[in-house]
Amino acid sequence: MTVNKVLPVSLELDKFKSKQMNEAGVSLHLTERQENELSTLLYEHKEAFETDKKQLGEIIGNEVDIIFSIERPYPPLLKRLAYPAIPKSREALELHIKELLDLGVLKNFGHNEEVEIPTPVMVAWHNGKSRMVEYLRAINTYTVPEKYPITRIQISLTQISQEVYISTMDAWKGFHQGLVTPRAKKYLIIIVHFGVYEYLRIPFGIKNAPSHFQIMMN
């Protein structure tokens, strides 16, 4: 019989500090007391953080919608074929798609389902690294914009100008942590040389993504 032992909180905290805190980039200017207080605070809320990049957060209650300013029949600009790609880019694209499938950002689109607005995808290269880019200009052209104010960086800097300590946290694949409405999903179908996929979460590049992310942050 195996008995699962529960480690004392102090030991769990020490383990958390030795692994997670070392990866968090904690300032070397903190005193020992300040570092311990920060470690304790983060440990108490550790379930809010994902550290192995295998699972995305999911922000519920603020799904992105897409409302078109036009009606059917849609113009040819919204109906494009998959882009051709060199073998190197094809291989990179397959890896990007696999990652998004594993994270639950994309799902396979049914072969017998009609694709009304296909969005082609290409691979952009910079300094030897690849990035998947969707042609969303057409969708954005006909999307009704939302009018939620985006916080200006100058205002944010003014608000923290008198602070002694500043903490920054990065939302890994931030937009992908937000969901989209059923109506938006039918507009967010991408086509590549090896299949058709549907976005379940907010893709980078759609018109109203920044305003929705600002709402989530607020």
Image (cartoon, rainbow, N blue to C red):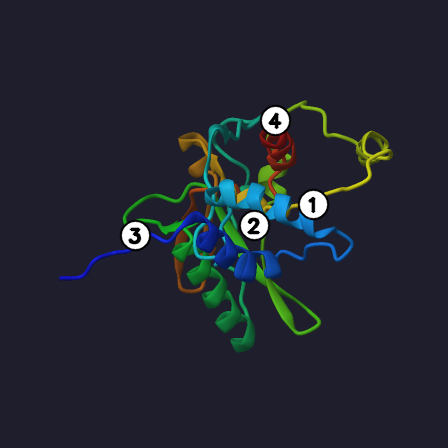
- Cα–Cα span, label 4 and label 3: 30 Å
Residue at point 86% right, 33% down? 162
Residue with the mark numbered 3: 111
Residue, far top: 147
Say whether disc 1 or disc 2 marks the residue closer to the N-terminus. 1
Q: Are marks 3 and 2 in contact (CB under 8 Å)?
A: no
Say whether disc 4 or disc 3 marks the residue closer to the N-terminus. 3
Q: Report x, y in % for residue 159.
A: 82, 29
Residue at point 42% right, 53% down? 103
Q: Looking at the image, is mark 3 or mark 2 nearer the viewer?
A: 2
- Cα–Cα span, label 2 and label 4: 25 Å
Residue with the mark numbered 2: 173
Nearer to the camera, 66 or 166 = 166
Residue at point 69% right, 45% down? 168
- Cα–Cα span, label 4 and label 1: 33 Å
The quarter holding residue 203 reads top right
Say whether disc 3 or disc 1 marks the residue closer to the N-terminus. 3
What secondary structure is marked by label 3?
loop
The amino acid pointed to by label 3 is His
The amino acid pointed to by label 1 is Thr
Residue with the mark numbered 1: 168
Q: Is residue 77 visible?
A: no
